Amino acid sequence: MSDAAYAVDSATPGQAITVVINPDDDYDVHTGALVQENPDGMVDVTFGPRPQPRKETAEFGDNLAELLADSDLSQIAERLLQGIELDLQSRSEWLENMSNGISLLGLQVKNPRGAAASGATPAEGVSTVDHPLLLEAVLRFQANARGELLPSDGPVKVRNDGEGNELADKLATELEKDLNHYLIKVAKEYYPDTDRMLLMLGFSGISFKKGYHDPIKRRPVIASINAEDLIVSNTASDIDGAGRITHRIFMKPSLLRRMQLIGAYLDIALPENMAQTQKDAVKTKIDQVQGIAPTTYTEPADQDRELYECYCEIEVPGFEHTLKDDKTGEQVETGLPLPYKVVLDRESRRILEIRRNWEEEDLFCMPRNRIIAYIFIPGLGFYGIGLLNVLGNATKAVTAAWRLMIDAGMFANFPGFLYLKSLAKQLTNQFRIPPGGGMPIDTNGQDIRQSIMPLPYKDPSAVFIQLIENIATTAQRVGGTAELQIGEGKQDAPVGTTLALIEQATKLMSAVHKRLHQAQGQEFDMLKSLLMEDPEALWRHNKKSKVLKMLTAMAGQQPVSDAEEQAEDRHRAMFLAALSDCELMPAADPNTSSQTERYLKVVALRQMAATNQNLDMNKVDERAMSVMGINDAQDFFKPPPAPGSPPPPPPPEQLTAQATIMAAQARIADAQTRAKEADIKAAQGMQELQSKERIASLGVAREQIIHQGDLAAAERARGVENQNAAADRIHKLALATMASRAARQRAAEGLAHRSAESAAQRRHDAAMGVEDRRHKLVSGALGHLHEAAQNDLDRQVQSAPPEPTGVGP
């Protein structure tokens, strides 16, 4: 060891000694000294923990940190940490805005200013109440979004885009059941984690989800990321265009050690956290609202490790991007930074993991995005616009107005006062007299009304109250949470009109719902890619997997005994082929953002089916029950009639239609009879007019003959006149006979029509007695459901104040 001592003593103070570690070198476990012989006969000695031996080769998905030297890892870590610090500084104002916005939710119970700890009457009397305008909008959005995106029977719907045969469709159906079982029962964190994410999404305007393979749980995991824990470059406009994305993770030391033991992280010794973890403004405000006091001291072993999981494009020494030269045939470095996932510890500034972040078959090495952004409203930059941005200023204004009104009421009931100096000899100047009590004061013989003067406080004016209501109403309308004015209190409002009003009033939230539907579709695409990388994860934790049973039946063997490995490979190949032909889609309807709209659409569909004979009423009723949440709709329908049984009576709708047709036919026949009578009367009138003309002409001729003295001619004219009169009487008798026949025919047709209507009514009443239970079950349920929804909306309209047209002076 004398040579070793000489080598150490001859080193320049502060000079770094670089040693290439060889596992065969002499390492003293007691002193922690590593002795290495050099070719020139010198010996280098280093002290500290023995580094892990580096690998010489690695597969595509291995941790490259095990192949790099400590100096290379340190350079990469320093460059990334400097960039992350700059990213943190660039969003400081956004964090401060978020912190102030959490106070506007009004979740913290506050005492009035000047109040004692016991809750006594405040000395100052200044209120600290918060208006729930922002909180109401956030809670409404969360409840509505959860009901649409997280249904009770599962959020995934599988569409078969491959061969349209019966086996493929059945496999897609079973795959849909297994995926929903996976997200509800296996990944039990998915529903509560998504529910919490929706709350922060509506509040801040943006939230994130990350998909990855959890080596400890041995399955894919899709977890939400708080917006304050996702650090991006200030030049990024969206998640896909960000050059560096960093996820800040607070990990327990025990979990970190497990990740090292299973090989996910580099197994190196990390120093204990000597400094307390510094929380940002948002986490500090959340702790304050929840009533959690800041930690003064924590044991270093109990502190969470702050890790940075950075998705970036860097150059890793020894793994540079190369292309083949067409002339020489050699690989030439291009200097192109490649996408990697780098995990490092902030406190020790050590890298724990470096893995490639692109597909192995991708020649262009495009980054693989494992983070999905949920955006409320696309903003001007990277962060979206949330209800905090939309309603924040209005909430501040209404909160200030509320406090002024409460303070005005407080001062009106407990007014301040001014008193003469001569009253200063009293033992106290607090003259708050309890109800029914009194307190003597000394006025030196003066009038008590001249010694004490109350301050001239006054109640808020009606204009001020109207202004507050106008601010709240305008903010609700802008934020999409205004009460809907539907039906105007009418129970018989048309369904189409109601749907149009709902669509007009929910334009904002409908657009937000479409964005969430698109983001959830991207999330399920990411889940599909994760399952294709690890297919066994779908049935590894589900022993009753229906997909596995189908694959086993299709393979013709059970995955047991010596053929277990071959069977698993066959199942894997068949599952990958089936999964590649299927498309995972959200179960939510992108065009319908609320259950009320679905109810109204069902009511409109039933009204259409009542007048359209081409629509199957049973199918319509089955759809209506499905919308109402009744899964066993088939149990409510009557079984088909047995062979040879008489046909069932026609439904009430058909009988009503038949009676309507018969009544229309009777009305047509009656109109035809009336037309015939009109023709007869017209002909009769014409005959009478012609007879009168002949009589008049004969009278003139007779007078001429009499005047000429031709009596014989006059007698002949009188005979002709008598003949014409007889002909007229015969004609009138014929007309009367025709009118009598028409009357008898009309009476007979009316009797037949009344008989037909009576028979149809009897058949209709009989059918109504048979079909009463089914008709009342379906139509009555839908009618009451529509009436309940209509009444609820009308009550909201009545409770909402009308929008003012202006403010008085």
Image (cartoon, rainbow, N blue to C red):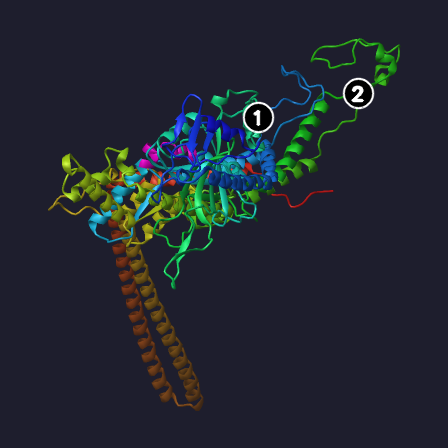
Stretch in magenta: 182-193
Instruction: Give the label on residue 288, or none.
Output: 1
Residue 151 versus residue 507 in the image, above or below: above
306 and 43: which is toward the camera: 43
729 and 755: which is toward the camera: 755
Label 2: element kind? strand
90 part of magenta stretch: no
Q: Disc 1 or 2, which lies upstream in sequence?
A: 1
The kind of residue tagged 1 is Gln
Q: Which residue is mark 2?
A: 417
- Residue 435 visible in image: yes
- Residue 483 visible in image: no
The residue sitting at 65% across, 31% down in the picture is: 402
Label 1: element kind? helix
The kind of residue tagged 2 is Phe
190 part of magenta stretch: yes
The residue sitting at 37% across, 54% down in the picture is: 363
Describe residue 356's horizontal placement relative to residue 449 as left or right.
left
Q: Quadrant of residue 478?
A: top right
Instruction: Give the label on residue 592, or none.
Output: none
Q: Which of the two discs, 1 and 2, sits closer to the camera?
A: 1
Relative image position of residue 282 (x, y in whole percent): 56, 33
Label 2 Cα neighbours within 10 Å, binned few <14 / some 14-19 / many ≥20: few
Relative image position of residue 568 (x, y in whole percent): 21, 40
**Callout 1–callout 2 Cβ contact below 8 Å:** no
